[in-house]
């Protein structure tokens, strides 16, 4: 794949992910009474689920391509899968959608404001649910075979 195409996949995937994150935060801000850090927690957990589903799906798909003799269509699909992995992966959509820096910043601010319980919940619940969501995404795809 051309280097320019890789950069464009990451650029557009990341930009779209950031835009969706902003939209989710705005929806939370305007429609709920929940603190802003809860929107980031939700975004991070959903992003972890998506990355688990996305990469498990691509891995399954790539395995199928490599098992059979590669037809020209399969080789084109393999190239498309690499582009999708870039656009949807850590450096693309999920990278722009999830936000570890905001999660960390929110936790520090909550701690500094004396809201240590909320800071601890944000730190530990986001990490635990994020890891579980990746596992769930992988399991969902593997269970769909």
Image (tube, rainbow, N blue to C red):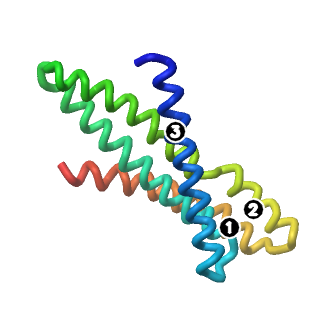
- Name the residue beneath numbered marker 3: 12
Assess whether mark 1 and mark 3 are in contact (beta carbons under 8 angstroms): no
- The disc label shown at residue 107, or none: 2
Assess whether mark 2 and mark 3 are in contact (beta carbons under 8 angstroms): no
Find residue 75 and report its horizontal and vertical position in percent: 23, 21
Image quadrant of residue 41? Answer: bottom right
- Name the residue beneath numbered marker 1: 37
Q: Residue at x 65, y 78 (%)?
A: 34
- Residue at mark 3 to residue at mark 2: CA–CA distance: 29 Å
Residue lying at the far bottom in this picture: please name it.
33
For disc 1, the neighbor class at 10 Å (few under 14, some 14 to 19, many from 20) is many
Q: Nearer the viewer, residue 137 or 25?
A: 25
In the rendered structure, which disc, 3 or 1, sits on the residue that comes first in sequence? 3
Count of marks placed on residues: 3
| Left or right side of 89 for 40 | right
Q: Is residue 82 above or below residue 18?
A: above
Q: Nearer the viewer, residue 109 or 114?
A: 109
Secondary structure state at the residue bearing disc 3 = helix
Image quadrant of residue 81? Answer: top left
Secondary structure state at the residue bearing disc 1 = helix
In the rendered structure, which disc, 3 or 2, sits on the residue that comes first in sequence? 3
Secondary structure state at the residue bearing disc 2 = helix
Give the quadrant of the N terminus.
top left
Q: Is residue 27 above or below residue 77?
A: below
Q: Residue at x 56, y 65 (%)?
A: 24
């Amino acid at each position: 794949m051309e280097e320019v195409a890789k950069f464009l996949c990451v650029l557009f995937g990341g930009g779209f992910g950031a835009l969706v994150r902003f939209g989710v935060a705005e929806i939370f801000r305007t429609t709920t009474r929940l603190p802003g850090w809860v929107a980031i927690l939700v975004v991070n957990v959903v992003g972890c689920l998506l990355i688990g589903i996305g990469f498990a799906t691509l891995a399954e798909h790539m395995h199928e391509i490599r098992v059979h003799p590669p037809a020209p269509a399969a080789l084109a699909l393999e190239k498309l899968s690499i582009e999708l992995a870039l656009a949807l992966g850590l450096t693309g959509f999920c990278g722009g959608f999830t936000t570890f820096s905001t999660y960390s910043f929110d936790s520090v601010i909550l701690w500094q404001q004396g809201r240590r319980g909320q800071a601890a919940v944000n730190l530990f619940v986001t990490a635990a649910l994020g890891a579980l969501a990746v596992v769930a995404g992988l399991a969902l795809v593997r269970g769909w075979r």
